[in-house]
Amino acid sequence: MKSSLPVCPVPSEQQPINEFQDLQESWFFRWATLDLWHYIKPILILWSLSWAVSGPVAAVSFPPAKYPALFALSAAVGACVIPLLALVRLTLGWWYVRDRLSKETVFYEESGWYDGQTWTKPEEVLQRDRLIVSYQIQPIMKRLWRTFAIFGLLLVLSSIIWGILSHRSSLT
């Protein structure tokens, strides 16, 4: 049976639908698609492992025996760097594929960076790709943005607590 869709000139590995499937199958990018606990667990693991770096740095700045709360708070905030970098990478990967699927045209390279071409998607392909964006990628993007919002809220709360603690420690 023949397909009614025209032949796509875009190399297979550069077709947006295949890039999307590659992300879904990737151990790293699949992380954003998992159920809530399996999504949060790697963030907590990265945060815990980051303490190996941020803890000693915080201990030098705020000796735990003298400033236990400032030490804990600064180490906790410093430990957020690596999970945030991982989340930024996740977001950029999904964002890139979302944009490639959403656009009416696809830029591709035939044999190298110097010979780029553009292919206009047929209406059926464009509709399919936009459905994928709406029902599969947008929920992932919303989850990632909510995670950034939670980190942002935690950093704002940490700043407020920091202000209170440092004000108290300066009074004593």
Image (cartoon, helix red, strand yellow):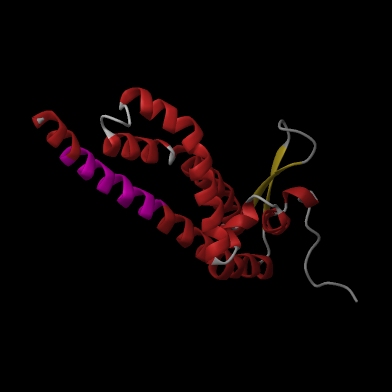
Give how far across and how far down residue 110 sits, in percent.
78, 40
In the rendered image, the residue lying farthest to the left is 171
In this rendering, the answer to whether 148 lies above or below 113 is below
* In the foreground, 156 or 11: 156
- Magenta part of the protein: which range? 148-164
In the rendered image, the residue lying farthest to the front is 65
Residue 41 appears left or right of 6 = left
Number of numbered labels in the structure image? 0
Give how far across and how far down residue 111 sits, in percent.
80, 36
Give how far across and how far down residue 113 sits, in percent.
71, 32
* In the foreground, 52 or 19: 52
Q: Pick the quarter of the image with the C terminus.
A: top left
Residue drawn at 71 percent across, 59 percent down: 21
Secondary structure, magenta segment, majority class: helix
Residue drawn at 73 percent across, 56 percent down: 18
In the rendered image, the residue lying farthest to the bottom is 1
